[in-house]
Amino acid sequence: MFGEGTPFDLRMHVVRIPVRVIPTFWLVAAYLGWNPDRLDLVGVWMLCMFFSILIHELGHALTAEAFGYETDITLWHFGGFARFNPGFHFPPYQSFLITLAGPFAGFALAALTFLVWLGLEFQGMADNEFVSTAIMDLLYINIFWGLFNLLPVIPLDGGRLLEATLGLCGVRAATDWALKVSLVVGALTAYGCFQIGLAGMGILLALMALESFQHLQARRW
């Protein structure tokens, strides 16, 4: 998707899995947590976002590797994705488990963060501004964003879980039904977001609904 990359890409291996972070990831992370008066806290937010999304994608990738697929991870301006080789024709149960592993890893990180916060509170060490900010950022990203990611809207994990679940239940044309649900839920939640003033999230969901509609149309030809 991104060719050979640029000299500014961050590359590493985590648990043997190649990880690539393209520069736009950092730009969007900074934008989402921007506070011109506290650039130090913007840095904390960016690190928390990096760590949280990496853990989420590792959940997908490590589960895929357990099934024998080669994987690599890319973090980019829309978050991140784990690529599998081969990347198609998964049995439904494998698709379900691989998809579920990402949100599960994020919620596990949130639970661990909460336990650390309780331990720091007990020892009277939770008053440090950077520590408390990091804890709140990690909880926000891994709980709120994690729940958002479970909406049955493709390409969110919730949409992929719905598709895999329909396949496991033996529903014919499972992908078509998942796209139909994605279209309806995406459109309705986008409308709700606009109504309560969450324009950015509304635009994102509207684009996802449009993409589901376009995929449906393409599958009919």
Image (cartoon, rainbow, N blue to C red):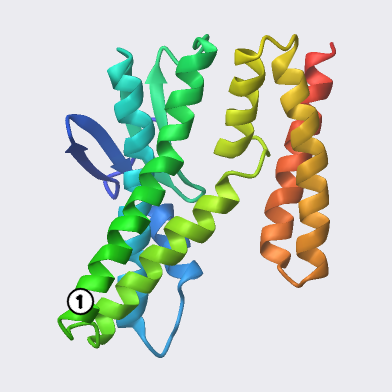
Q: What is the quadrant of the C terminus in the image?
A: top right
Dot 1 falls on a residue whose secondary structure is helix
Q: Does residue 174 appear to the left or right of 103 in the view shown? A: right
- Tell me what residue is drawn at x 71 percent, y 50 percent: 205
x, y percent for residue 121: 24, 80
Evaluate whether residue 18 shows in this view: yes
Q: Which residue is mark 1?
A: 120
Choose top left, top right, bottom left or bottom right for residue 40: bottom left
**Residue that lies at the very extreme toward the front in this rendered image:** 122
Label 1: how many Cα within 10 Å (few below 14, some 14–19, many 20+):
some
Up-down relation of residue 176 to residue 143 (above or below) = above
- Tell me what residue is drawn at x 49 percent, y 16 percent: 93
- Tell me what residue is drawn at x 56 percent, y 47 percent: 149
Q: Nearer the viewer, residue 123 or 148?
A: 123
Q: Does residue 113 appear to the left or right of 141 in the view shown? A: left
Q: Nearer the viewer, residue 106 or 30?
A: 106
